[in-house]
Image: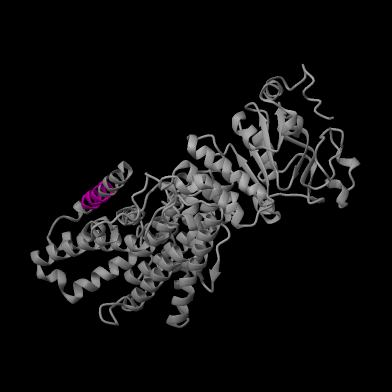
């Protein structure tokens, strides 16, 4: 909120520098949001959100239902164009109007309702929208081999056949496929909406493992989660939303469960925890 | 990492389990359809050997040709999770408009007349496909309603243009639908080629892949950056274009543009797709199944005529076939879901 859209001159690399009340981000933020506002008619779902997402780290976006988390990731994923505000990608100002624009930049989104096609097999899902063609036909062999390679790189070894229909997979496997999809397309930022919401204990552990592996590959991960246990296990940074506003963000060490819960429920106004700036 | 490796394989799938041969064949919808086709064919032939005569087979192929392109277009549409009720009306309207156009062209050579007539029919079909797309995308109608509207409009316009009687008699055209190569006429061969190409296109191209993907989860397709609206527009245009070509074929077969030619055929086309194993909820269809479905429906209706069963029973027979096919599919799916 300290930065108005006018005060950052576009197309200079310094724009990636965190200038908001955000403390720990170095100048290396992969994605920076400045003053992102999104209105649906009279309703302001997002109010001047400033957020920096660094590469190679897991940023957890937390907040109560209706806090604007999903709207925010949809703005980053190119589903909704923000009403106002600016998005900087690797220091450059960008505008995204379609999901394809975001994908082209290297932003992949794994949706809560899992944007996979149950009636297609794993390979077909992994390559959906990016099919490899050889002359007139699809290059199924190449796609199949690449799928196997990426799955094994990510140690996703629980699927029997990459020609299995995705509808026959378990929730954890489906998450793994959705994530592997992002990795295969060499995404630099993977956004995950409630990746563990519908999963059992061991599958949750697997997906959290996978998230850490993504970050260790230098990929920025933005995770939305309601589950603070998961958040504290996996996140390097935390950003808290409250009623459309980003009320607090910083390294995970600045928070504990109690303070996180307080900010989530009250917006942090009653206490000092919002001031995580050192 | 080791956790991922050691996790047990998914219990929810039975893919890759050793299934016996026979079971795999029985589980294969196309194979079962073929068996059913052969059985029905044998039954009718056993009843009356005329059924297997060259001329009767030729007739069946002509009937098949008037149906299959509608069913092919419908397969694409149903694979996206939509439905196109307008294909029958479109084929009739295209035939009428084509017939009127060809009447005006009569002084020109026969090939010019037929060539332009084909293009006119195609154009009418594409136009109605576009109207369907506009109604869906801009007027926000669901496919059922949008195509119901164009079905009614097309059938009504056919009557308006013709006053209810056939127009543009052209007896020369009829000869073109007579068998030339074995039991096939030239248009039959073109129609079969179009069917084969459409099948390859549906199952082996990007376009086909997106068609199924949209029927499976259109949000996912949109999320990966595919223009779903544009894709659906193409699908309905394809369906309309194939209906337009069918209109031209019906014109050639009848030697005139008959306003009521296509009435009700959309339901037979949809029946062929359903018998072929497609799911009306989208995401799953087989063009080979559709073709077999169209073959079965064709021989059932002609076989009943040869058996002297009143043609009025035709629709009943179609209904029974649909019920059987849908039940078979539901049972098969049910047994799979239990695993």
Quadrant (top left/top right/bottom left/bottom right) for the C terminus of chain A: top right
Q: Is residue B163 visible?
A: no
- Specify whether residue B155 is painted magenta: no
Give the residue drawn at x 28%, y 79%. Answer: B179
Farthest-out residue, front: B2
Residue B112: horizontal and vertical position, in percent? 47, 80
Q: Quadrant of residue B111?
A: bottom left
Magenta span main SS: helix
Residue A88: horizontal and vertical position, in percent? 79, 47
Residue B214 located left or right of residue B87? right
Q: Image height check: is B191 above or below A234?
A: below
Q: Which stretch appears magenta?
A: B315-327
Give the residue drawn at x 48%, y 81%. Answer: B108
Q: Image height check: is A254 above or below B131?
A: above
Residue A61 located left or right of residue B254? right
Residue B280: horizontal and vertical position, in percent? 38, 48
**Front residue (pair B293, A162):** A162
- Specify whether residue B316 is painted magenta: yes
**Front residue (pair A34, A81):** A34
């Amino acid at each position: 909120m300290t930065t108005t859209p006018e005060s950052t001159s576009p197309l200079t690399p310094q724009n990636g520098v965190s200038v908001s009340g955000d403390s720990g981000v170095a100048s290396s933020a992969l994605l920076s949001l400045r003053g992102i506002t999104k209105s649906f008619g009279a309703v302001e779902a997002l109010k001047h959100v400033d957020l920096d997402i660094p590469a190679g780290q897991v940023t957890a976006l937390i907040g109560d239902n209706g806090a604007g988390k999903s709207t925010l990731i949809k703005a980053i994923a190119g589903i909704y164009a923000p009403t106002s505000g600016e998005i900087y990608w690797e220091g450059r100002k960008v505008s995204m109007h379609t999901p394809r624009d975001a994908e082209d930049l290297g932003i992949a989104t794994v949706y809560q309702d899992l944007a996979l096609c149950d009636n297609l097999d794993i390979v077909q899902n992994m390559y959906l929208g990016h099919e490899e063609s050889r002359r007139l036909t699809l290059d199924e062999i190449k796609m199949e081999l690449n799928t196997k390679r990426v799955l094994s790189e990510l140690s996703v070894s629980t699927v029997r056949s990459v020609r299995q229909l995705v509808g026959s997979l378990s929730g954890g496997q489906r998450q793994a496929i959705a994530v592997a999809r992002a990795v295969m397309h060499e995404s630099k930022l993977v956004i995950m909406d409630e990746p563990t919401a519908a999963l059992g204990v061991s599958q949750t552990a697997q997906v959290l493992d996978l998230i850490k592996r993504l970050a260790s590959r230098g990929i920025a991960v933005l995770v939305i989660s309601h589950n603070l246990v998961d958040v504290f296990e996996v996140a390097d940074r935390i950003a808290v939303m409250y009623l459309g506003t980003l009320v607090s963000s910083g390294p995970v060490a600045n928070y504990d469960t109690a303070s996180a819960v307080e900010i989530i429920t009250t917006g942090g106004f009653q206490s000092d925890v919002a001031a995580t700036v050192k | 990492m080791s956790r991922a490796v050691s996790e047990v394989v998914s219990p929810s799938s039975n893919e890759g389990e050793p299934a016996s041969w026979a079971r795999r064949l029985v589980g294969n919808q196309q194979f079962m359809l073929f068996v059913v086709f052969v059985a029905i064919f044998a039954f009718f032939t056993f009843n009356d050997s005329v059924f297997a005569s060259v001329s009767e087979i030729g007739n069946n192929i002509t009937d098949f040709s008037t149906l299959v392109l509608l069913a092919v277009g419908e397969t694409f549409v149903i694979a996206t999770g939509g439905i196109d009720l307008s294909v029958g009306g479109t084929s009739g309207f295209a035939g009428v408009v084509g017939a009127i156009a060809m009447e005006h062209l009569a002084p020109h050579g026969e090939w010019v007349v037929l060539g332009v007539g084909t293009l006119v029919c195609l154009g009418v079909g594409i136009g109605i496909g576009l109207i369907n797309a506009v109604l869906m995308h801009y007027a926000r109608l669901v496919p059922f309603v949008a195509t119901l509207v164009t079905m009614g409009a097309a059938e009504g316009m056919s009557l308006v243009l013709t006053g209810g009687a056939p127009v543009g008699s052209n007896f020369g055209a009829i000869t073109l639908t007579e068998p030339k190569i074995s039991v096939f006429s030239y248009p039959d061969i073109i129609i079969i080629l179009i069917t084969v190409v459409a099948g390859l296109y549906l199952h082996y191209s990007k376009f086909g892949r997106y068609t199924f993907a949209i029927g499976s989860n259109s949000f996912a397709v949109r999320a990966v950056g595919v223009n779903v609206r544009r894709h659906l527009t193409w699908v309905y245009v394809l369906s309309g274009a194939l209906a337009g070509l069918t209109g031209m074929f019906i014109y050639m077969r009848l030697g005139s543009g008959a306003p009521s030619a296509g009435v009700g055929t959309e339901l037979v086309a949809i029946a062929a797709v359903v018998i072929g194993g497609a799911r009306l909820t989208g995401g799953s269809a087989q063009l080979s199944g559709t073709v077999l479905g169209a073959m079965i429906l064709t021989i059932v209706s002609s076989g009943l005529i040869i058996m002297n069963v009143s043609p009025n029973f035709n629709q009943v027979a179609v209904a029974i076939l649909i019920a059987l096919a849908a039940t078979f599919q539901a049972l098969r799916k049910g047994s799979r879901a239990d695993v």
